[in-house]
Image (tube, rainbow, N blue to C red):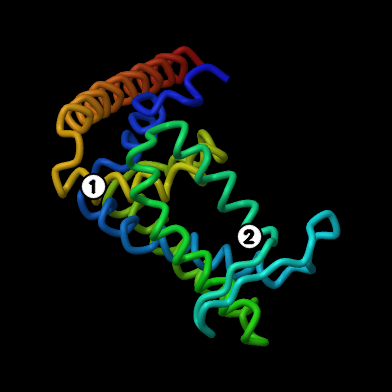
Amino acid sequence: MPGLFDVRKQLVFYGAYHSNPTNVRIHMCFVPLIVWSWEVIQTTLPHPSFLPHAAYKPTDFLVFELSYAALYAAANWLYYFALEPTAALLYLPQYALMLGTATAFGTAYPNALTIGFALQGVSWVAQFLGHGLAERRAPALLNNLLGALVLAPFFVHLEWLFMLGYKPALHKDITNGIGAEIARIRKAEGDRRRADAVQGKED
């Protein structure tokens, strides 16, 4: 797929749907919660038969084991590393901590599945409200489900890094690209509305 490993293209696409500061803050709060609760949900699934039973438990609150959650996290992180290696390495401690605590929670609490789905529901409602009330645009997942779901955590991570001064040239390039993409989308939407209006008059 063209551009799949082009960090600028992927982040410009995602950023074009997340340009409103309020919506960005909502995502910065709730996207990590979506990631964590999804890992909790995966941890409650039966152990995959194709994986050996292997676990490391440094504390009661931090557990690492071979599971669907670990495979999912590893696949996502490898994609982030392919996109932007330095940022992915900086994200690794946080991502590992989220996985470890989610695994500990999912394996220790009988109602973990219910709590995981409840957190998913609250977080997704908050994000849709952010898009509807602040961004006033449909979320990216309606145009690119896989890209939006996989990229969201890394985009939030990069937002924090950019705020701290990470690679200002890359930040500027992506910001400019987002502006150009928003202008293109708005022009296309305007052209579509005008075409619909003309068609309506002809009918």
In the picture, the quarter occupied by the N terminus is top right
Q: Nearer the viewer, residue 118 or 56?
A: 56
Q: Amino acid at mark 1?
A: Leu
- Is 194 on the left or on the right of 108, as rendered? left
Question: In the rendered image of this protein, does residue 200 appear above or below residue 19?
Answer: above
Three-letter amino acid code of the residue under disc 2: Ala
Q: Which residue is mark 2?
A: 69
Numbered mark located on residue 99 in the image: none
Quadrant in the picture for residue 97: bottom left
Indicate the secondary structure of the residue bearing disc 2: helix
Residue drawn at 62 percent across, 86 percent down = 109
Measured as percent of width and height from the top left, residue 58 is found at 52, 77
CB under 8 Å between discs 1 and 2: no
Q: Earlier in the sequence, mark 1 or mark 2?
A: 2
Give the x, y percent position of residue 66: 68, 61
Q: How many residues crowd around disc 1 within 10 Å: few (fewer than 14), some, or many (20 or more)?
A: some
Quadrant location of residue 107? Answer: bottom right
Hey, which residue is sitting farthest right in the picture?
A: 49
Q: Nearer the viewer, residue 112 or 65?
A: 65
Between 198 and 12, which is closer to the camera in this rendering? 12
Q: Indicate whether 111 appears above or below 156.
A: below
Apparent side of residue 158 relative to residue 124 in the rendered image (left or right)? left
Estimate the spatial distance between the alpha carbons at disc 1 and disc 2, rounded to whole Å: 25 Å
Q: Is residue 3 above or below residue 19?
A: above
Residue 114 position in % (x across, y down): 62, 79
Left or right of 180? Residue 156 is: right
**In this view, 55 is above or below 14:** below
Tag 1 residue: 161
